[in-house]
Image (tube, grey):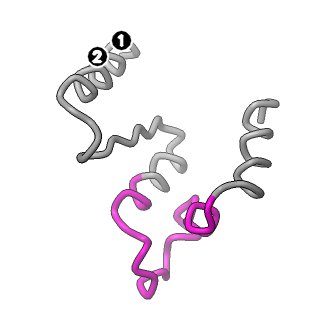
Amino acid sequence: MDIFTHAMNDRMRTEAPLAARMRPRNLDEYIGQEHILGTGRNTLAMCIANQTKSDFITLSAVMAGKADLRAVIEKEAVYR
């Protein structure tokens, strides 16, 4: 873990909204959470990305447009 990741984790523990702090971060935390309505597909996708050490890019269908989606796809194409 580098200094930036450590600082982000510290801020997350103290400043993030409660929902963000309580959200499962890995598959072990996700399993067995059927009773929690806030644990959904995006959280599962984020857990899988964390487990596989993959990038996880969040886009809001309400806020993002075609240009945002194209930028993400082009960025990913450069890395491959």
Q: Residues within 10 Å of mark 2 (few under 14, many from 20)?
A: few
State the image coordinates of residue 18 (x, y, percent, origin top left).
Answer: 62, 68
Residue furthest out toward the top = 78
Q: Is residue 76 left or right of residue 55?
A: left
- Residue drawn at x 46%, y 35% is 55
Circle 2: residue type: Glu
In the picture of the structure, the residue carrying the numbered disc 2 is 74
Given this view, does label 2 or label 1 mark the residue nearer the observer?
2
Q: CA distance from mark 2 to mark 1?
A: 6 Å
In the picture of the structure, the residue carrying the numbered disc 1 is 78
Q: SS of the residue at dot 1?
A: helix
42 shown above or below 7: below
Residue furthest out toward the bottom = 35
Q: Is residue 44 left or right of residue 71?
A: right
- Residue drawn at x 43%, y 73% is 38
Magenta residues, start to end: 17-45
State the image coordinates of residue 56 (x, y, percent, origin top left).
Answer: 44, 40
Question: 9 or 54, which lies in front?
Answer: 9
19 shown above or below 61: below
State the image coordinates of residue 67 (x, y, percent, origin top left).
Answer: 22, 23
Quadrant occupied by the N terminus: top right
